[in-house]
Amino acid sequence: MADYLHLNMSRDELLAASSLGLAHLGDAVFEVLVRGWLAVHGKAKPKDLHKAAVSYVSAPAQAAMAERILPVLCEEEADVFRRGRNAAPHSIPKAASRGQYQTATALESLLGWLWLQGRHERINELFGLMMEGEDHAS
């Protein structure tokens, strides 16, 4: 039986994966990270938790957080990020510019790529850098 929490895909399988497919997975990874962060640091009321989560998982917020980690990405991670940014999105939300949406997609692609390798420590390290200075559920 496959272990879908620990897929650990091979390098060749990862190279063949679409950037938008990686972003689809990375979006969920990012949301789980944000929800975990909010559960530890956030507000107690469910409506407040949802509002806070939405503020972090929006494309503009993700794009701003992505800028914080770009200097620490290794060459291979930066390549995945670039590939994700260059993927052609089907639509762009009204609340985001094309650039913000592409950067958010790049971040999500990177997170999906790392998740599929089982590199949870690296995901946690990058997420910690993204959340540095956040005011604990604004």
Image (cartoon, helix red, strand yellow):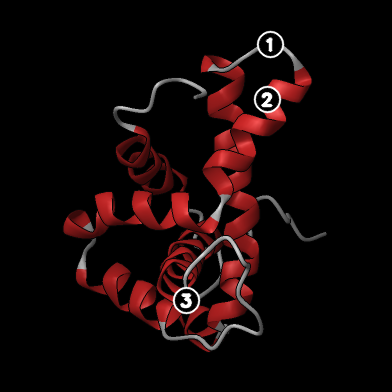
Q: Residue type at mark 3?
A: Arg
Most foreground residue, 50 or 12 = 50
Q: Residue 64: x, y in percent? A: 35, 52
Which of the two labelled residues, at mark 3 and mark 1, occupies the earlier sequence position? 1
Q: In this view, which residue lies farthest toward the right?
A: 1
Q: Are marks 1 and 2 in contact (CB under 8 Å)?
A: yes
Task: Report the residue marked by disc 1.
Answer: 44
The alpha-carbon separation of the residues under discs 1 and 2 comes to: 7 Å
Q: Residue 104: x, y in percent? A: 47, 63
Q: Compared to 109, does 87 lie above or below?
A: below
Q: Residue type at mark 2?
A: Leu
The alpha-carbon separation of the residues under discs 3 and 1 comes to: 34 Å
Q: Residues within 10 Å of mark 2 (few under 14, many from 20)?
A: some
Q: Residue type at mark 1?
A: Ala
Please state the total of marks drawn on the protein image.
Answer: 3
Q: In this view, which residue lies farthest toward the left?
A: 71
Image check: 98 left or right of 38? left
Most foreground residue, 45 or 37 = 45
Task: Report the residue marked by disc 2.
Answer: 49
Q: Residue 129: x, y in percent? A: 30, 39
Picture quadrant where residue 86 is located: bottom left
Which of the two labelled residues, at mark 1 and mark 2, occupies the earlier sequence position? 1
